[in-house]
Each structure stands twice: as structure tokens, then as C-alpha cells.
Image (spheres, rainbow, N blue to C red):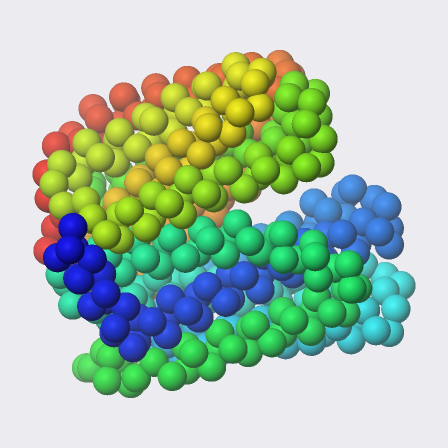
């Protein structure tokens, strides 16, 4: 364990990795804080729950529209500078929300316009940041860097909503000013990543439909990449228990708002702890079984949560669910990045972002629709069973992924 810890410390001593992970942490923390404030403020002003859904939709539409051009940009321009620009755009959005708040929120449409700008920024930052990390570390350190980055992201997801709620007690203007400061700090750290890591001899191709779709064509041609992305997609699509947490907290577990807060943090805790463990001791053998096992455990934990009427058992199931999800996400990210050449890594990351982003949105909708038809318990249990069925089916459809023993060498 000492040697493993030493190797992890070597990753942390890499100044570019330290800046990258810190910038991503601050940016994620800022986003989590801000979304709490925007949702609370809009509902306080309008009292219309539809506006809460429109906040998400206003970010999703530009994200889906721009994600493929963003992937093209990540393959043809300086990735660190793209992400830096996106974080600066996030700071501008926080400033605009601050101005709107100080002038008095009389209409929701200015807020929706700012959310659309945030969605556009997210579209460019995701493929840019995901394809940048492999350029910052040598191949032997990449798996630890991925685990370290994932665990810090989860930590930001855990504490962000709580910090946002506390800051909101001082008023939404304080929240947006704080978010602006965090976004500026994130952009400064990302800007300081040394240019020595920038790729050389990058052939810039014109923006065309063929180039935009080249990432999708590449994914279709690689069974390992296609299998990993699609397995994760259907697991999230069918196993979206977290979308129904308010119903479980209120009607089944009878815990109230405090219990709901704990339930919401449980998956993030499991994911963060698992990410730290993977940073210390990365997966190196039986790669395929680890990924399928993670998705299968995710399905089992979903079923246990669905049938549980005990708060502590439900918490434990959600912690395990988060840890299992981290295993599958960790393996998927490594497989996609390692099996993809650098010249097209941005466009492939964009395709993966579309798959995963769509599964999150559609998964929440599917869970809500199923719960309306059959009730929350049946909806979650059926989703968990469907996840297990997909896992078994994918072992037949993608046998090369199921039998994979080692990660491929980085392209």
C-alpha cells in the first residue's frame, strides 16, 4: 500500500494535474451552489413548479445542440484554453444573475436566458476537460488521475447543495457573488496549466457534418467503447431511483426534509469513498467483469432501496449504489479515453456526454412516469430488475468487453 500511496502522491505533485483537479472541483462546487439558489429563488418568485423544470430544460437544449461542435473544437484547439473560457463564461453568468437579483426579479425569462448560456458553456467544457486529462499525465498514472478527479467531483457534488443552502440564508446576491468568485478562481487555475502539455502538429479540419459525426462513427466502429457507453446509459436510464427520493422520504420512509437531505448525499458519499480507494489502488485486471459487476451491483442496490422501509437500510443501499456507479463510471472513462486516439478524443467525449447526459434527463422522466403509473416502489424495483437484465444481455452483445482483462494501451 505504501508504494501505491507514493504513486498517488506523484500524481498530486504534478502541478498540471493539481491545477486541473482543483479547477474542476471549484467549478463543480460553484455549479452545485448556484443551481440550489436559482431553483429556490425562482420558486419563491413565481410559485410555479413548472419553472423548476424549465430551468433544467433551458440548460439541456443548448447543451445537446452544441455538444458535437464542442467536441470538434476540443480536437482542433487548445483544450485548456477552451475550458478556461467556459469557466470565465460561468463567472459572467453568475454576475448576470447577481445583477438581475439586485435589480429585482420581475420575470423568469432573463434567468432562463442565463441558464441557456450556462448550458452552452457546459457543452464546451465537458469534452474539453475530459479529453484534456490524458494530455497531462503519463500512461502509468492516468488511472489514478481519473479516480482522483472523479472523487473530488463527487465531493463537490456532496457539499455544494449544503453550502448553497447556507449561503442563501444571507440572500441570493451573496450566493451569486460567491459563485462568481469560485468560477474566476477555477478559470485562473485552468489558465495556469502549462502550455508544454499542449498537443503539437494538430491538423485542423474544417467544421463539416462529416467531421461532426466522426466521433459517432468511431464509437460505432469500436465495440469496447460502444459497449461501455451504452451499458452505462441504460443502467442510468432504468436505475434512476434518486429522482424519486422526495417520494420515498415523504411517503415510505417518513423522514421529512432532513432525511431527504441525507438520502441525497448517500450516493455521493459512496462514490467519493470508492473514488479515493480507486486512486490508491486502481483496477488493473479483470476490467470487463469489474465494469459489469459494478452495473449489476448498482441494479441490486436499486432493488434493495426500492423494497426497503427502513431508513438506515435505504441509506446503506444508496451508499452502495453510489460506490457501484463509481466503479462502472471509472472503468468506462478509462476505456473510452484509452481506446480513443488523441486526434478524435474530444469528439468521442462529446458523444459520450450526449449518451450520459440524455440518460440522466430521460432516466428522471422514466422514473417519474413509472411511479405515476405503478407507484414509487414498483417503479424503482422494475428499474433495478431492468438494469440486471441489460447487464446480462450486454455480456452477449459485447463479449469482447465482458472478457476484457486489461485496459488497452493509451492511443
Q: Is 176 on the left-hand or right-hand side of 48?
A: left
Q: Nearer the viewer, residue 147 or 97?
A: 147
Using the image, determine if residue 347 lies above or below residue 239: below
Does residue 254 lie above or below 348 as drawn? above
Side of 236 where 199 appears, left or right:
left
For the C terminus, the image quarter is bottom left
Residue shown at 59% from the left, 38% from the top: 262
Query: Residue 190 location in percent, x, y?
Result: 41, 77
Measured from the top left, where is residue 110 in percent x and y?
A: 77, 66
Q: Is residue 256 left or right of residue 272?
A: right
Give the residue displayed 47% in from the left and 44% down from the top. 268
Name the residue: 32% across, 57% down.
Answer: 148
Q: Is residue 69 left or right of residue 37?
A: left
> Of all residues shown, which one is farthest toward the front?
2
Q: Position of residue 378 (x, y in %)?
A: 56, 14
Kindly tell me whether residue 184 is visible in this rendering. yes
- Which residue is located at x 34 percent, y 19 percent? 389
**Does 276 appear above or below 294?**
below
Q: Is residue 64 visible?
A: no
Query: In x, y percent, where is residue 265?
Result: 54, 42
**In the picture, residue 3 is in which quadrant?**
bottom left
How many discs appear?
0
Q: Quadrant of residue 323?
A: top left
Amino acid at each position: 500500500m505504501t508504494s501505491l500511496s507514493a504513486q498517488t502522491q506523484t500524481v498530486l505533485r504534478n502541478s498540471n494535474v493539481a491545477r486541473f483537479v482543483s479547477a474542476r472541483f471549484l467549478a463543480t462546487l460553484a455549479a452545485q451552489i448556484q443551481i440550489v439558489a436559482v431553483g429556490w429563488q425562482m420558486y419563491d418568485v413565481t410559485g410555479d413548479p413548472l419553472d423548476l423544470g424549465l430551468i433544467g430544460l433551458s440548460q439541456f437544449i443548448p447543451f445537446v445542440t452544441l455538444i458535437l461542435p464542442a467536441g470538434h473544437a476540443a480536437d482542433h484547439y487548445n483544450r485548456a484554453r477552451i475550458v478556461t473560457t467556459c469557466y470565465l463564461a460561468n463567472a459572467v453568468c453568475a454576475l448576470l444573475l447577481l445583477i438581475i437579483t439586485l435589480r429585482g426579479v420581475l420575470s423568469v425569462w432573463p434567468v432562463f436566458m442565463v441558464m441557456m448560456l450556462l448550458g452552452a458553456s457546459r457543452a464546451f467544457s465537458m469534452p474539453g476537460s475530459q479529453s484534456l486529462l490524458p494530455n497531462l499525465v503519463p500512461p502509468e498514472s492516468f488511472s489514478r488521475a481519473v479516480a482522483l478527479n472523479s472523487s473530488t467531483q463527487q465531493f463537490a457534488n456532496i457539499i455544494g447543495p449544503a453550502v448553497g443552502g447556507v449561503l442563501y440564508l444571507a440572500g441570493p446576491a451573496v450566493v451569486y457573488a460567491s459563485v462568481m468568485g469560485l468560477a474566476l478562481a477555477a478559470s485562473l487555475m485552468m489558465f495556469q496549466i502549462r502550455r508544454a502539455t499542449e498537443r503539437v502538429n494538430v491538423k485542423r479540419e474544417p467544421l463539416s457534418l462529416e467531421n461532426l459525426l466522426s466521433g459517432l462513427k468511431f464509437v460505432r466502429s469500436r465495440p469496447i467503447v460502444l459497449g461501455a457507453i451504452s451499458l452505462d446509459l441504460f443502467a442510468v436510464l432504468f436505475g434512476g431511483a434518486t429522482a424519486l427520493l422526495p417520494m420515498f422520504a415523504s411517503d415510505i420512509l417518513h423522514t421529512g426534509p432532513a432525511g431527504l437531505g441525507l438520502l441525497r448525499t448517500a450516493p455521493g458519499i459512496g462514490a467519493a469513498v470508492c473514488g479515493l480507494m480507486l486512486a490508491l489502488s486502481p483496477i488493473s485486471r479483470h476490467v470487463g467483469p469489474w465494469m459489469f459487476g459494478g452495473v449489476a451491483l448498482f441494479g441490486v442496490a436499486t432493488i434493495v432501496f426500492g423494497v426497503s422501509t427502513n431508513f438506515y437500510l435505504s441509506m446503506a443501499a444508496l451508499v452502495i449504489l453510489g460506490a457501484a456507479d463509481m466503479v462502472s463510471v471509472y472503468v468506462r472513462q478509462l476505456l473510452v479515453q484509452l481506446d480513443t486516439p488523441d486526434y478524435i478524443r474530444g469528439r468521442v467525449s462529446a458523444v459520450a456526454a450526449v449518451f450520459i447526459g440524455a440518460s440522466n434527463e430521460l432516466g428522471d422522466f422514466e422514473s417519474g412516469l413509472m411511479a405515476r403509473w405503478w407507484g414509487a416502489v414498483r417503479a424503482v424495483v422494475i428499474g433495478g430488475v431492468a438494469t440486471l437484465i441489460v447487464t446480462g444481455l450486454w455480456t452477449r452483445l459485447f463479449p469482447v468487453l465482458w472478457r476484457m482483462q486489461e485496459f488497452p494501451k493509451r492511443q
